[in-house]
Image (cartoon, rainbow, N blue to C red):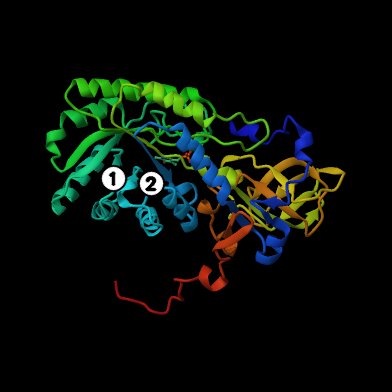
Amino acid sequence: MPPAAADTPPANEEQATGAAPAMLDGVDLHALAARLGTPLHVYSAGAIRARIAALREALAGLDALVCYAAKANSNRAVLGLMAGAGLGADIVSAGELWRALRAGIPARRIVFSGVGKTAAEIDAALDADILRFNLESRDELETLDRRAAARGVLARAAVRINPDVDALTHAKISTGRAENKFGVSLDEARGWFAAAGTYPHVRLDGLHVHIGSQILSVEPFRQALRHVDAFRRELEAGGHPIRSIDVGGGLGVRYRAGDRTVAVADYVAAIREALAGHDGRLLLEPGRWLVAEAGVLLTRVVRVKPGATRPFLVLDAAMNDLARPSLYDAWHDIAPVGAARADAERYDVVGPVCETGDTFARDRLLPRCAPGDLLMIRTTGAYGASMASTYNSRPLAAEVVLDGGRYAVVRRRQSFEEMVAGETAADHWENA
Ligand SMILES: *Cc1c(COP(=O)(O)O)cnc(C)c1O
């Protein structure tokens, strides 16, 4: 999806002028915002569990492990929900390893991806005895072999294939083209298997592929998996058994009314078909699809400021709370919570941060708004709070999980003291 298309007026403008429901997972959002303040990240546990159940149902009968991509939303409570449902985790740093283990995800359900794993991170993962390393370079394979040798252990690993497939998504979240930094070519991977004896402390018996995020068609998945399966057959014919295939994540979600997503049943059907000849284990790494639509960001209107072309709707949420619009020109539905005024207005919807990029939407048709109104920015459960920063010295927003009429604050609003924790004045000099 080209970024320029992200903020053109929606096909169905009626939708854009409506109000959002006042209740989510049995909780009154006005009362919640009054009690906990805004901006507030809100997640429905029921919605997340429904996604897990739907994926499980689609996977019935397969030897499959779902490793939730922790970076989508790494709040301890969200990871805890995944742990409780028996899911594993796909991690990309020692910090995520630490979070996943602390949330109760067993090490033997954790896979480790990413191009920049340091020796120290590899050590931490070996010590935890994680399920699998998804390797992305020869240097990483060599490092893993050395670190495993030093510990006298055998590391389980998969090679991440770069299938050179266009995921038809935003350039910044496309990862499966040859020019992207992720994975290795089939030629390179062939070399690893041929030289497997050189790395006696690595059991290289898995294939991994992840071509990008927010994918809205099943075709790129099919193409990538066809490459992977052809390679599996070649390897097995050459005497290299493949015990697991990790199909990555990337399944897209509905950000706006017109978005056509891939049904999870169709996604899994494509996997079943492409990998029908594989009799080992299947790993999946969905992130966004499990949590995005379960989350909303509650925010209040600070003021309506007249502009040269149209008024600015200034919110108390900003790009530091939700970076996707400024980072990817992403569209998020925005709607008043509960009731809306009958007349509509076109706004540039912005946050208070001192950047023109701190814009949630341009020329967006909304019910007329006034200072103090409670709005929701929708579909913020993934890559929302997990990408947040304290830029402009705005403390991290609170996060709350709703579940059948109850709520639990799972991250308290950061205080100024917490925001600067670890900083000191330069008054304790050391000689270098
Ligand atoms: C980010 C990532 C995922 C999850 O992607 P989603 O689009 O959120 O499903 C899965 N696997 C890897 C290796 C990733 O980097």
Q: Quadrant of residue 140?
A: top left
Q: Nearer the viewer, residue 11 or 174?
A: 11
- Where residue 219 sits in the image (x, y, percent)? 48, 22
- Residue under the point 45% across and 55% down: 80
Quadrant in which the N terminus appears: top right
344 with respect to 220 (left or right):
right
Give the residue type that dot 1 points to.
Leu
| Mark 1 crowd level (few <14, some 14–19, many ≥20, 10 Å Cα) | many
Residue 251, placed above or below residue 400: above
Residue at mark 2: 88
Farthest residue toward the right?
343
Residue 101, placed above or below residue 211: below
Visible in this render: residue 253? yes
Quadrant in which the C terminus appears: bottom left
Element type at mark 1: loop
Give the residue type that dot 2 points to.
Gly
State if disc 1 and disc 2 touch (CB < 8 Å). yes
| Mark 2 crowd level (few <14, some 14–19, many ≥20, 10 Å Cα) | many
Farthest residue toward the bottom?
427
91 with respect to 244 (left or right):
right
* C-alpha distance separating marks 2 and 1: 10 Å
Residue at mark 1: 131
